[in-house]
Amino acid sequence: MRRALSPREVNVADREISVAPGAAPPNVNLAAGATGGPFTAADLTFVSPPNAGRASIVNGEFAQASGPQATGFYLKFIPNPAFSGQARVGFRLTSALGSSNQGTITYKLGYDAAQVANEINDLVHGFVSTRQNLIASTVKIPGLLERRQMANATEAVTSSATPSGDGMVFGFSTSLAQIEAARNKADGVTESELPEFNIWLDGTFLVHNREESGSKWRSFAMISAGADYLISDKALLGFSFHFDRMTDPTDGDNELSGNGWLVGPNASLEIAKGIFWNSSLLYGGSANDIDTPFWDGSFDTTRWLFDTSVSGRWDIDDVTTFTPKLRGVYFSETADDYAVANGAGDRIDLEGFREEQLRVSLGAEVARQVALENGSIVTPKFGGTVGVSGLDGTGAFGSITTGVSMETVENWSVDAALLLNFEGNGETSAGAKLGISKKF
């Protein structure tokens, strides 16, 4: 025979609350409709789905501030503006008689379209802006100065791994001219003419952690390839292609990713002895995905990048070189109108936008060779770059580098360097580089 419920047993009631889109529900008195009080404690048992909102138990506004009377317990729930559907919150109450059964408060929620659009818009803008910074600082197209340096190469492939304050950068580069020069050096050929035609390949992979990413790592990679032709010993024309890939997670389980490309001509001229003018005009686009817990979508962009610089390499004396560089970059990227949708088929349309950067920088490096008594050559280096990023950029930026390289008579090479970067928004990063190699 079923026993009737005693009023002294601890029991709580389930409830259902409808919430208007964008509104916050009132705090719920958990003791309302419950038996077995007064209650001395309240505990949350679950939130389903976990990312539907934030739940907490608070003391009631009308409880006594002092005295023996027990304070009431209220459920405070802050909905996730991107969530639509039913959110369930479980709880238990405790009194001198024991713990209650598990009660459930069910919220019927609708998404806040305006806030969802704002959050998605901020994510996309941040993604495009960050990627522009990385592309502008990573894209590399060799000119006449680099061609001449390739002719003195001793290794067919150049690689590097550079840690920074928040991540790691891996890079490699090679070319037909570099491979030919390395082969000639191995065969004992000390001097050779520059080949008229050259094909080159360059790659960079970066992993980076920033505050918005929490414990997750952002990655960026760029692979560049090109071909160039020497019209004369003072003029070079070429064509290059660049492919980039970026993933950008945030601490809120959002992730944006995209594949992009740039293609176009480049030219390099020696305008005076030891002074080179390099320019390139690149056109491209990107295809990108938006992945959030409740809303997904995609967007496409088109790009224009104009890069021009004047650089030189001057021998101050027999052992000291000065390498200055003045560079300007204009980068424009236009995102088409796009949309995101949730699992229920709801759709939010967002307007496209244009992100522009105009970066102007001036840098230089001084290196001096010092011959040691044992035959080794030590070359200390010091350099720096200062610049400004206008339009939609972050303002002033710069870097300071210092390092030293040593070549021993046993054909060992050691290269070490320190790097400090700073941005106009207050961000700074530091890095170090150490490389050891031996020629056989």
Image (spheres, rainbow, N blue to C red):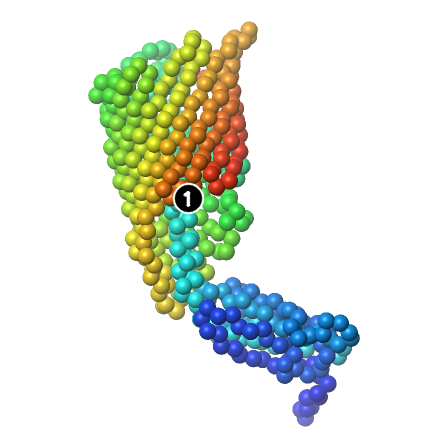
User: Which residue is pictured at 53% across the width and 72% down the height?
Assistant: 25
Q: Residue 65: name its quadrant.
A: bottom right
Q: In this view, does 254 lie above or below 166?
A: below
Percent x, y for residue 17?
52, 77
Residue located farthest toward the right when viewing the structure as drawn: 68
Q: Is residue 142 left or right of residue 426?
A: left
Circle 1 crowding by C-alpha within 10 Å: few under 14, some 14–19, many from 20: some
Q: In this view, does 388 lie above or below 319?
A: below
Q: What element carries label 1?
A: helix
Residue at label 1? 130
Q: Which amino acid does label 1 sit on?
A: Thr
Q: Is residue 97 above or below residue 406?
A: below
Q: In this view, does 65 lie to the left or right of 22?
A: right
Please tell me which residue lies in front, 405 or 67: 67
Quadrant location of the N terminus?
bottom right
Q: Residue 274: name its quadrant.
A: top left
Residue located farthest toward the left when viewing the structure as drawn: 231
